Image (cartoon, rainbow, N blue to C red):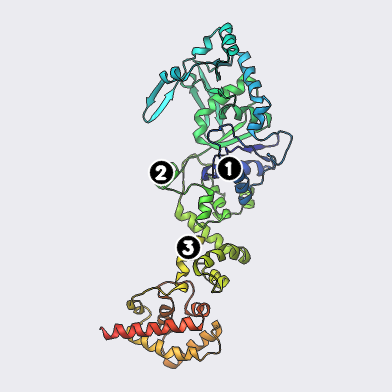
Amino acid sequence: MAKIRTRFAPSPTGKMHMGNLRSALYEYLVAKHEGGDFILRIEDTDRGRFVEGATDIIYRTLAGVGLIHDEGPDKDGGCGPYVQSERVKSGLYMKYALELVEKGEAYYCFCDKERLESLTTTIGEESVTHYDKHCLHLSKEEIDANLKAGKPFVIRQNIPTSGTTSFSDENYGVITVENSELDDQILIKSDGFPTYNFANVVDDHLMGITHVVRGNEYLSSTPKYTLLYKAFGWEEPAYIHLPLITNEDHKKLSKRSGQTVTLEGFIEQGFVPEALLNYVALLGWNSPDNREILSLEEITKEFDYHRISKSPAVFDNVKLRWMNGEYLKAMDEDKYLKLAVPYVEKTLGTGFDSKAVALLVKTRIETLCDIPEMIDFFAALPDYDAEMYIHKKMKTTFENSLESLTDLLPRLKALPDLSLESLQGCVAAYVEEKQIKNGVALWPLRTAVSGKQTTPGGAYEIIEILGAEESFKRIEKGIEKLKAAIAQQ
């Protein structure tokens, strides 16, 4: 069996869409599961959509998620150049287009904008132009005269008007279409650049691509590719079309609906690359044992493209948040602190033990962006209602909460330090002395120093981080708040 070769061929038009990331991942997995080659090719022939710096985003994104290519613009494997605009300069695509013209499989088209617009019809919300093969019937003399006069032209594929074209997809099976439904697509544009569809076929052949992996929106274009391969007499690659990715409303994942759809966008929202890659792997595939938390190495080992689903994959943000939280919990402490400390310091400044605060929330957050809201009470005590001191399960009331705080404050002030061990010993001795439940002492203490019903860590951890001066000031404020509440009863 020939060595599997796949390619990721993005256009440098901006940030990496999650659909593109899944395509890159599956292309990587199809190759690497069998020990094959994963190739990076930059398709920059659409100059109107080219974005400066987008190529760097592609490199940064692939490296950031661990999808290391074997060949590409920076790794010549003998099939370069790997940037299409550089291949254009050599006349490569024009050479193959003219070969098709000679065979009668393509032809020059000199139609102007006005004539093409007259062929345009509106179907729903889309404008569709079905070319009528007008220029196919030009004589050789007319063509030569137009070329000599420098008249602008494109080169179109000459698609049969009758019969059918079939191709086989590894996921969807054999698909057959009527040739009459296909349009004579443009192969070479008027600026001399190839179209995406034509350059893909030429480059895939010359680079020895054995498996083409892409979204199922390309299913409708594939018959045209099949006809091009037949026209050249080239062997067609295996096709693996991937299911659509939709949002929870079963509509195509799109930034138009206000969704985050790019990898960088999710990272800015506090997600980590490993979790995003893991989650994207499950958008259309699942492991044999249905495990969901998998490293790239584990996914590569278990991946079988025959298990790819045909059904649309729903992008579930709730599940993604859960998975990201699991990655943060399991993350190496040093790596986690490198990611989390900047969020802590942006929220609290540098007056606190940033590492201690970050570790306090490590098992409680789902994204790094959850940190600020969870820790903001350290910076300033929120204005809270005295009703928070009443907890039926803890059996706390205004009266016993006031008693606990009043009794504990001088004991805490007398401690040599506010380490966790000292705090625990102090409160334990008080609970034992008063013969009360832990909650009767700890609930009002945590409420006083945090002003929140839920906090990362308990009273001991919060007091240790706040320090003596701020902790005692907050407890004193809690005492005053309880006295006022009792007076108003």
Reading the image, the residue beneath label 2 is 250
Q: Is residue 324 above or below residue 98?
A: below
Number of the front mark, 1 or 2: 1
Residue kind at label 1, given as amino acid type: Ala
Residue hosting label 1: 54
Q: Name the front one of labels 2 and 3.
A: 3
Q: Residue furthest left?
A: 489
Can residue 362 be spotted in the picture? Answer: no
Among all residues in the image, which is located at the extreme front? 149
Nearer-N-terminus badge (1/2):
1
In this figure, which residue is indicated by the disc labeled 3? 370
User: Residue 292: where, in percent of width, then height?
Assistant: 54, 54
Q: Give the amino acid at mark 3.
A: Asp
At label 2, which amino acid type do we have? His
Tell me residue 463's x, y (percent).
49, 80
Q: Nearer the viewer, mark 3 or mark 1?
A: 1
Pointers 3 and 1 in contact (C-beta within 8 Å): no
Point out the tag, 3 or 1, that comes first from the N-terminus.
Answer: 1
Which corner quadrant of the image does residue 212 belong to?
top right
163 is higher (above) or lower (below) than 461: above
**Residue found at the very far right of the displayed protein:** 78
